[in-house]
């Protein structure tokens, strides 16, 4: 089905990525030793994570955060044989008793499946494997293979009763679209418990901000250009929120004809989502909500994204489309500035 294929020009290949924050002069604002930030970098959940704390009991906070990340990775890994997700996926249709953390996240993801009209679907794992996105051995599957696999996907294949998770035989789940956001929320919980009120988390491009910079000003977050990933298209000035982006750039491959296939799939087709949105950034208080929604809006496209935003009041978004438009919601007015060189980009602001 040719129409399912993604044929984008080379410049589109350079999709959107989030840089970390530039912290213009934050630590220079104070001479007190307490204002010196402390950081830890961890490789977990298939990505590099950096946590920087500016106050509180910094060492204790970072070590608690690190332990929390390792614990959650141990629960949600799809490949580690003693993880809860692995046990669910190899249960042969039997119920598996899981931790509070896993039960809560699955419950949330199932709810988000309904709220996004099915765009967020944790049962796509076998389809992702067929494309080779899990092992990095990419191939374009046959339509027959995809339609066979799609028979095993969908919300109705997962049952959650208390902390008992049952998936139908042949169904496998993957919490990759929501796990990092949830992890960020739980890291922030650990930081707060250790007296931290100013911190910056960069979890592989997911930015989560605790409070403001130590001098009380907003953090500045660069939004990478989809036209040149070495460049920022805009900056966002924000405090105490999450800024989470989904884009095809994170994992993709190109076939001999130049068609690009990325790792975010449309659950309806089993093919890479082709909605016209090439980058979806969601801003809000809850990391797991922003994570779930960034993946979902990428799949849903502009019109459905706008409609979802109109019906809720717990997030803002920035979408970049394959026809060079930047669509943002009104909550970001005065907080987003396009960089020179992109000032000809058409900005549309969505209002309630
Ligand atoms: P994110 O980077 O948060 O957008 O998550 C992308 C990851 O979620 C992919 O690498 C897949 O493991 C998985 N995934 C892909 N498409 C979907 C989808 N429509 N719903 C849920 N998870 C997905
Ligand atoms: Mg996500």
Image (tube, rainbow, N blue to C red):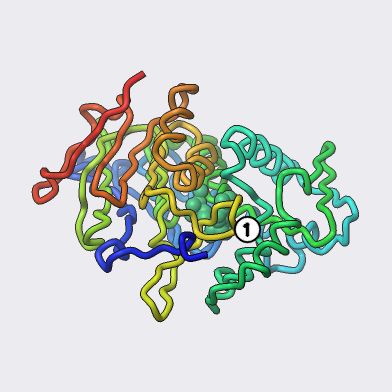
Q: Is 193 left or right of 97, judged from the image as shown?
A: left
Residue at 18% in and 38% down: 337
Residue 61 can be seen in this image: no
Residue 265 in picture, x, y percent from top left: 54, 56
Residue underneath mark 1: 73
Decide if residue 152 is on the left or right side of residue 210: right
Residue 291 image offset from top left, x and y in percent = 50, 44
Task: Return the residue found at the far top.
Answer: 352
- Helix, strand or loop under label 1: helix
Tell me residue 86's x, y (percent).
75, 62
Residue drawn at the location 63% of the way across and 71% of the way down: 130
Q: Which residue is situated farthest in the right direction here?
A: 94
Residue 211 picture quarter? top left
Q: Quadrant of the C terminus?
A: top left
Q: Is residue 169 above or below residue 121?
A: below
**Residue at x-position 32% and y-position 59%:** 15
């Amino acid at each position: 089905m040719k129409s399912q294929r993604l044929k984008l020009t080379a410049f589109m290949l350079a999709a959107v990525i989030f840089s970390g924050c530039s912290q213009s002069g934050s630590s220079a604002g104070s001479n007190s030793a307490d204002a010196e930030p402390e950081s830890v970098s961890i490789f977990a959940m298939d990505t590099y994570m950096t946590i920087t704390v500016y106050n509180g009991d910094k060492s204790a906070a970072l070590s608690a955060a690190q332990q929390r990340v390792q614990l959650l990775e141990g629960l949600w890994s799809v490949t580690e044989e003693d993880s809860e997700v692995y046990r669910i996926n190899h249960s042969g249709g039997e119920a598996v008793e899981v931790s509070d953390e896993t039960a809560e996240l699955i419950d949330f993801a199932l709810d988000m499946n309904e709220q996004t009209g099915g765009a967020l679907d944790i049962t796509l794992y076998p389809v992702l494997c067929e494309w080779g996105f899990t092992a990095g051995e990419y191939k374009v599957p046959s339509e027959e293979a995809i339609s066979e696999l799609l028979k095993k996907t969908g919300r109705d294949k997962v049952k959650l009763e208390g902390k008992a998770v049952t998936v139908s035989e042949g169904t496998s789940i993957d919490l990759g679209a929501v796990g990092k956001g949830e992890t960020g929320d739980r890291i922030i919980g650990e930081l707060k418990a250790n007296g931290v009120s100013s911190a910056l988390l960069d979890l592989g491009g997911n930015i989560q901000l605790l409070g403001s910079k130590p001098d009380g000003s907003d953090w500045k977050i660069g939004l990478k250009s989809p036209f040149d990933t070495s460049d920022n298209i805009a900056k966002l000035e924000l405090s105490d929120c999450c800024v989470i982006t989904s884009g095809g750039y994170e994992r993709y491959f190109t076939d001999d004809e130049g068609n690009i296939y990325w790792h975010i799939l449309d659950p309806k087709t089993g093919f890479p989502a082709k909605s016209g949105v090439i980058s979806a950034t969601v801003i809000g208080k809850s990391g797991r909500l922003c994570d779930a929604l960034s993946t979902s809006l990428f799949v849903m496209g502009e019109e459905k994204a706008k409609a979802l935003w109109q019906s809720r009041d717990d997030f803002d978004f920035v979408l970049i489309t394959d026809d060079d438009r930047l669509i943002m919601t009104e909550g970001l007015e005065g907080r987003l500035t396009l960089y020179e060189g992109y000032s000809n980009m058409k900005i549309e602001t969505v209002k309630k």
